[in-house]
Structures are given as structure tokens and as C-alpha cells.
Amino acid sequence: MNRPKQPIMVTKPFLPQKEIFMKYVDEIWERDWLTNQGPLHHRLEDALKHYLQVENLTLTVNGHLALEIAIRGLGLTGEVITTPFTFASTIHSIAICGLKPVFCDIKPDDLTMDEEQIEKLITEKTSAIMPVHVYGHPCNTERIAQIAQRHGLKVIYDAAHTFGVRKDGKVLAQQGDVSIYSFHATKLFHTIEGGALVYQDSALKQVFDDYKNFGIHDEEHVAYVGGNAKMNEFQAAMGLCNLSHIEELVSQRREITLRYREHLEGVPGLRLFYPDKEPGIAYNYAYMPILIDREAFGLSRDELHAVLKKKDNIVARKYFYPIGTEYDCYRELKDKSRVHVAEAAGRDVLALPIYNGLSLEEVDYICECILAQHR
Ligand code: T4K
């Protein structure tokens, strides 16, 4: 394949058949009901509970506000232990709620929170742990649960990347007190913008539903200081369309991942991840991260990223760089944080293009371009 005229981007949203989406739009027009817990919102909530086999699920307008609602709804205070190797949303959700993010390092093998570092970060102010199943790689949920229980802490999982990931037959989002999904357009399953909270305690349903609607409990009572995080009917319609495709989307991405592995595994200086080879894990193939060792590969991550973009018209992304401790707004937290593995991952990681519709020919081209740089 020759250099493509249009850039190959890191991702592209999946779009369902327009006619099917328009049938839902016709329904919206007939009803004059656009948002505020409409019928499609309820239908999607039920469909997701059924698909995910979970009892408690609350839809939100995006994944970020789901995190904020989880923090507020659980009444967290003081400090929350999280990872710097994530999207800005995770860390900001803590800070924006007036709490202090405390950074825990990650493990080199899967880039999730290093559970062995958590206990030394716990102080009398710690109220929760917020690990991230980054790229859908499952955290060590058993160990984190033990630590949380021993210290009386809540656990909120940022499960934004995990739609479709199961462990021993159960969706990962069933772990912790609360897990949140992102249904952003760039995600495997999307509602244009959107998100959801999944939780164990059914008493939280009312709390979360109130929080997403300005804290309004009913016409006469306002229970909480809440904002607006309601999913509208157009978003729910997109979700209903996309949910019916989920299995085929995962299997197409699996094919893409296997093709990448055929080309790239064993290449000196490149490290790939194999979450699907962990016992009991059904993976979703949402992301295709690789780590580049400059010495062994011959080019740094930044150099490879730049060559692919300029010469080959391939826009891979540095997910997740900069890491949280390097944000201007969290500089003062950096000194105390020992996050060397996260620093190295932030320096070396490159997320390669993966989306439904990326052809195997394009994967071959991307890999040829990468391998052409190997020295
Ligand atoms: N926690 C974690 C761990 C997360 O990763 C995220 C979101 C959240 C929480 C918060 O969830 P949300 O509130 O977003 O639901 C993108 C997504 O916008 C963001 O949702 C996602 N994580 C993050 C990892 O990726 P950017 O800043 O990289 O987006 P952008 O605009 O550069 O788009 C990425 C690529 O997608 C581009 O190359 C072009 C393509 N694209 C994008 C859009 C929106 C399209 O082709 N069409 C489109 O409509 O954050």
C-alpha cells in the first residue's frame, strides 16, 4: 500500500446504519421528548443492564461526570489515591471535587496501579482508591479489595476503557464500590458522548440519579449540590443502535490486533501487551499500545511518532503523555510522588491506530512503516 492521501488516525467512531438511527429519531419527533430520563434513556439503561448482567447502572452524559458523581455520591473527602498514567479526566475528577489526588506508581507488565505501593500512600485523610483499568487491562482487583477493606476505603474504578472486558465471565465494572464507563465517540461502544456508573449498592441508584439532575430529588426537594449530567434521547438512540453490533466490533478488533502481533512481536525494542492471554479474561481489543525502547529499537517513541506522522501519514497517539505529575496544574504534587514506571511509560508508549473499519492492508502498511525505522 502507498502513502494514504488521508491520514490514518488513531481511532474513528463506529457509525451504525443511518436508517436504523433515523427510526429512533422519528420516535423522538413523535414524542417531543428530548432529554431528562426519556423512554430511550430507560430502554438503553435496561438493555445495558441486561447485556452486562449488572443490577445497578446509571447513565450519564459523559464518562467524566460519571466519575464526579461517583466521588460526590460516595461522600468522599480528603485524599484519593490514583494513577498518573491515565487520561486527564481521572485525576481532574478528584481535584475538581475539592479533594487531593495522590499518585501511585504503575506496574511495568500491564501499566495498571501497582497495588504493592498503595498502602504506603494511605494517610488519615485517605477516603478512597481510584485505579484505572488502562486500555482495558484489568487491575489486580482482589488485592485492591483487600487493601481497601483493611483500611476502610472506598474503591472507584475508572473502567472507561473496559466495555466488553470480562473476568471469569463477569464484566470488570462489577468490581469496587463503583466503576465508570465512558461511551465517548472514540470508544468501542459509544453514545456520541456518554457514560455510566455501575455499582454494588442499589441504594445508590437514587443518589446518583439525583446528582445527575442538579441534586433534585422530586418537585419539592433538592437533596444535593448536583450538576447536570443527564444523557439525552439522541445519545441513547445511538447507544441502542451500537449495542446490537458489539460482538462483531470486538471480533473485528481482535483480528486487527492479531495482525499487529504477527508483524511486531519479537521485534527488538518493541513491547506488546497480551491481556487476552491472562486466565479468565475476555478482552475487548479497544486499544493497541506498544512500548518503544529507544536503545534496542533505534528510535525513541517521540521520533517514531513524528516520522509516522510526517512521512507516512499515520497519526498514532502518545496515550498517556504527559502523565499526571507532569501537568502544569499538578506540579506541586510531583515532588512527593515516586512514579518512575509511569514516567517511563509516559515517555515510551505509543497507541497505534485501531478502529472498526481499519483494514488489514492498512495494518500491514502501518507495521511496514514502523519496521522500516528499526535499526
Ligand atoms: N477516564 C479515562 C481513562 C478516559 O480515557 C476518558 C476519556 C475518561 C475517563 C473520560 O470519559 P469521557 O468524559 O470522555 O466520556 C479522546 C476522547 O475524547 C476521550 O473520551 C478518551 N478518554 C481519550 C482517551 O481519547 P482526545 O483528546 O484524544 O480526543 P481527540 O479529539 O484527539 O480524538 C481522538 C481521535 O479520534 C482523533 O484522532 C480523531 C478521532 N475522532 C474523534 C472524534 C471526536 C474522529 O474521527 N471522530 C470524532 O468524532 O480524547
Image (cartoon, grey):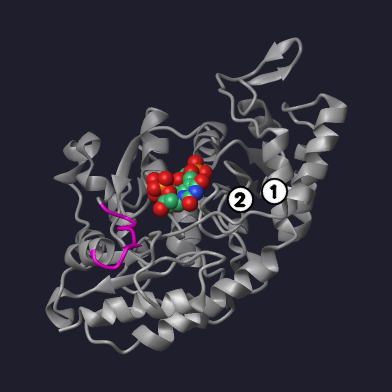
Which secondary structure type mostly characterizes the magenta part of the structure?
loop
Say if mark 2 contacts mark 1, CB within 8 Å: yes
Q: Residue at coordinates 44% horizontally, 74% vertically from top-left?
A: 362
Residue 375 is a magenta residue: no
CA gap, disc 2 to disc 1? 6 Å
Q: Which residues are magenta?
A: 311-321
Is residue 167 among what the camera can see? no
Nearer to the camera, 266 or 356: 356
User: For mark 1, does the 10 Å Cα neighbourhood hold few (<14), some (14 to 19), or many (20 or more) residues?
Assistant: many
Q: Residue furthest right?
A: 30
Sequence-first disc among 2 and 1? 2
Nearer to the camera, 319 or 71: 319
User: For mark 2, does the 10 Å Cα neighbourhood hold few (<14), some (14 to 19), or many (20 or more) residues?
Assistant: many
Give residue 190's mark: 2
Nearer to the camera, 224 or 109: 109
The secondary structure type at the circle numbered 1 is: helix
Amino acid type, mark 1: Gly
Quadrant of the image occupied by residue 352: bottom left
Tell me where residue 118 appears, x and y as whole percent: 34, 56
Q: Quadrant of the N terminus?
A: bottom left
Tell me where residue 184 appears, x and y as whole percent: 54, 47
The secondary structure type at the circle numbered 2 is: loop
Tell me where residue 158 appears, x and y as whole percent: 48, 51
Amino acid type, mark 2: His
Nearer to the camera, 345 or 256: 256
Give residue 239's mark: 1
Judge left or right: residue 77 versus residue 196. left
Q: Residue at coordinates 83% horizontally, 36% vertically from top-left?
A: 26
